[in-house]
Amino acid sequence: MRKGTYKDECQMMKGDKETDKQDGSRARSEERRAIWTQGSEVLLQNCPAWSIHLLGQFTLLHSLTNIYTDYTTRT
């Protein structure tokens, strides 16, 4: 079997580094997703339904207020 040139070996090593980077970021995002899911499950188990409903209503109102403010300050 013929050995590749130095340039070919560098390209292969660079490809390995890229794969390692992608695998690392994928693992971190999966870990973050697991932590978020676990936190939301704990929140849902320990909070009464009305408080979660109020939090959602507040978030919606806050978002709409920001949109309205942005719209009125542009014109």
Image: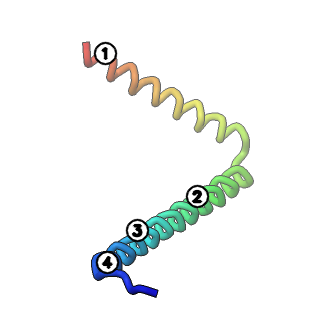
Amino acid type assigned to the residue bearing label 1 in the image: Thr
How far apart are the two marked residues, 4 and 3, measured between alpha carbons?
Answer: 12 Å
Q: Nearer the viewer, mark 2 or mark 4?
A: 4
Amino acid type assigned to the residue bearing label 2 in the image: Arg
Answer left or right for 73 relative to 37: left
Q: Nearer the viewer, mark 1 or mark 3?
A: 3
Q: Evaluate if marks 1 and 3 touch, with contact meaning CB atoms under 8 Å apart.
A: no
The residue labelled by disc 2 is 33
Answer left or right for 36 relative to 28: right
How far apart are the two marked residues, 1 and 3, measured between alpha carbons?
Answer: 46 Å
How far apart are the two marked residues, 3 and 2, measured between alpha carbons?
Answer: 23 Å
Decide: few, some or many residues near mark 1? Use Cα within 10 Å; few <14, some 14-19, many ≥20: few
The residue labelled by disc 4 is 10
Amino acid type assigned to the residue bearing label 4 in the image: Cys
Decide: few, some or many residues near mark 4? Use Cα within 10 Å; few <14, some 14-19, many ≥20: few
Decide: few, some or many residues near mark 3? Use Cα within 10 Å; few <14, some 14-19, many ≥20: few
Q: Evaluate if marks 1 and 4 touch, with contact meaning CB atoms under 8 Å apart.
A: no
Amino acid type assigned to the residue bearing label 3 in the image: Glu
How far apart are the two marked residues, 2 and 1, measured between alpha carbons?
Answer: 37 Å
Answer left or right for 39 relative to 21: right
Is 27 rendered above or below residue 3?
above
Is 36 rendered above or below residue 57?
below
How far apart are the two marked residues, 2 and 4, measured between alpha carbons?
Answer: 35 Å
Instruction: Identify the residue shown where x is 34% and y is 21%.
Output: 69
- Name the element at disc 1: helix
Among numbered discs 2 and 1, the one appearing first in the sequence:
2
Q: Nearer the viewer, residue 31 or 17?
A: 17
Quarter where residue 55 is shown: top right
The residue labelled by disc 3 is 18
The residue labelled by disc 1 is 72
What is the residue that sits farthest to the top in this orientation? 75
Q: Nearer the viewer, mark 1 or mark 4?
A: 4
